[in-house]
Image (cartoon, grey):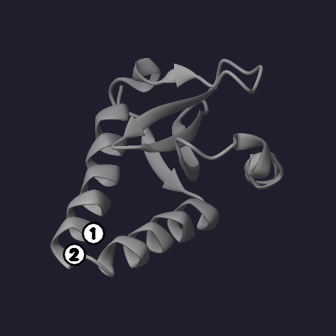
């Protein structure tokens, strides 16, 4: 059974910020990256455990999948997948842990 997708305000703001940054160089590439986030999210609807367990967190239901160089972080609930943050792969997750756990 496919799960319903939900996006936290923080995750949507992360995507908007990424798009704004990329758009300075290429609006076409910015649109492509944003589309990739939502396409990957849609795949998770049927394959919830496709992403890996986040190494920094000790919860099997909080996972991540990479989209280009970004970590799309999500939580698997009983009937939904909640996307909580999008973080660049080179950034430390500890800087975002408070906002992630607040959203959960």
Place of residue 3 in the rendered image (x, y in percent of width and height, measured from the top left)? 42, 36
According to the picture, the residue beneath numbered tag 2 turns out to be 26
Q: Quadrant of the N terminus?
A: top left
The residue nearer to you, when weighing 25 against 101, is 25
Report the residue at 27% width, 77% height from top: 25
Circle number at residue 83: none
Using residue 51 as the reference point, say whether residue 100 is left or right of it.
right
- Place of residue 4 in the rendered image (x, y in percent of width and height, measured from the top left): 43, 44
Instruction: Name the one closer to the observer, 89 or 47.
Output: 89
Residue at 66% x, 18% y: name it: 60
Characterize the local packing of mark 1: few (<14), some (14-19) or many (20 or more) Cα atoms within 10 angstroms. many
- Do we see residue 81 in this rendering? no
- As drawn, 24 above or below 66: below
Whether the residues at callouts 2 and 1 have beta carbons within 8 Å, the answer is yes
Q: Mark 2 or 1, which is nearer the eye? A: 2
Q: Is residue 13 visible?
A: yes
Between 37 and 25, the one nearer to me in the picture: 25
Instruction: Answer with left or right where residue 86 lies relative to residue 4.
Output: right
Residue position for label 1: 30
Q: Is residue 69 above or below residue 58?
A: below
- Find residue 86 and report its horizontal and vertical position in percent: 53, 52
Q: Residue at x 44, y 67 (%)?
A: 18
Nearer the observer, 28 or 90: 90
Number of numbered tags placed on the structure image: 2
Distance of label 2 from label 1 (alpha carbons):
6 Å
Residue 28 vertical placement versus 41 (above, below): below
The image quarter in which residue 11 lies: bottom right
């Amino acid at each position: 059974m496919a799960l319903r997708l939900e996006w936290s305000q923080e995750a949507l703001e992360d995507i908007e910020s990424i798009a704004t940054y990329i758009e300075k160089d290429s609006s076409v590439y910015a649109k492509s990256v944003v589309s990739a986030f939502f396409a990957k999210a849609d795949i998770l609807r049927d394959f919830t455990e496709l992403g890996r367990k986040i190494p920094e967190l000790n919860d099997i239901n909080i996972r991540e999948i990479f989209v280009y160089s970004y970590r799309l972080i999500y939580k698997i609930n009983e009937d939904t997948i909640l996307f909580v943050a999008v973080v660049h792969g080179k950034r430390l997750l500890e800087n975002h842990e408070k906002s992630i756990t607040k959203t959960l």
